[in-house]
Image (spheres, helix red, strand yellow):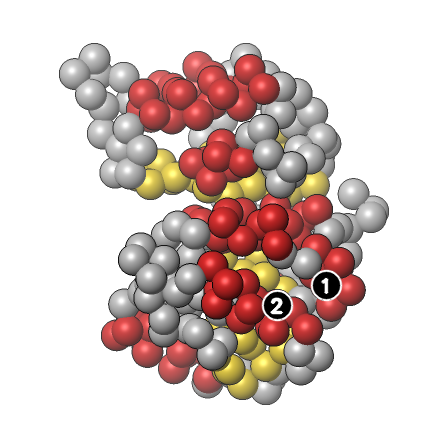
Amino acid sequence: MSSFTLPAPLSTGAEVRVVAASSPFDLERYARGVELLRARYAVSEGPALFAKHGFLAGEDEMRLRDLHAALRDEHVRAIVPPRGGYGATRLLPSLDVDAVRRQGKWLVGFSDVTALHAVWARAGLCSLHGPMVCSLPEASAELQRAWFTLLEGGAPPPLTELTQVVGGRAEGRLFGGNLSVLAALVGTPYFPDLTDTVLALEDVGERPYRLDRMLTTMLQAGVLRGVRAVLLGQFTKGEPGAAGVSADDVLAEQLGVL
């Protein structure tokens, strides 16, 4: 845990670079998000930000070039994608982990950005699982305050209103993100080391049987053996099938054995 570095806090006027590492995004939602960020920071955009290539925000080489440019620009202090979606995992074989480690910049995002969080963790650098440009304006005022407070060096707010599934006490390095993305990294060189972690998981649009399949893969691969505790966020738009098994049922059964 002591080997992890916290990026330098942002100050008013700090440069935040928007890089699309995954899917294309809605321009109206993006405009609202950029307006919110520009009230506080200097916002710059990757040259290929508005590119499209099928279900990707530009070809892999374009997205990777923008990401590397943001990493190597000494003026950029944080990288915030416009949205998640799909595509970040395609960049991992060519992503410069040494540049991530040397430059020590904030990365903010969730969903598909989980793949990039794994790279930041591999580099020994803390990152922030939170709203991106398009989703930040739609977040609650409380969440927006926490977003800015964390990036500017404040303490994270305590987690409240949790429901205990399996009791006990644990301490560890907080890591996590989207379950589907993490499960897709199993068996690759890019799966993060979860030893001594408090693992936070969330997902959207995954039916209970698909959640079961992903967790079964992770359990059988042994990647959860070193986990100290699990925090479960929202698992939305994944209604039970004809068998009536819910996402909560699957999560409790599969993770309750750890």
Which mark is on residue 15? none
Q: Which residue is drawn at 38% across and 26% down?
A: 211
Report if the CB atoms under discs 2 and 1 are less than 8 Å apart.
yes
Which quadrant of the figure contains the N terminus? top right
Badge 2 amino acid: His
Q: Name the residue under label 2.
A: 68
Disc 2 secondary structure class: helix
Measured as percent of width and height from the top left, residue 183 is found at 49, 32
Measured as percent of width and height from the top left, residue 60 is found at 47, 59
Residue, far left: 242
Q: Which residue is drawn at 56% across and 41% down?
A: 176
Q: Residue at x 70, y 41 (%)?
A: 173
Q: Mark 1 points at which residue?
A: 99
Which quadrant of the figure contains the C terminus? top right
Quadrant of the rendered image containing residue 23: bottom left
Whether residue 207 sits left or right of residue 124 in the image: it is: left
Observer able to see residue 7:
no
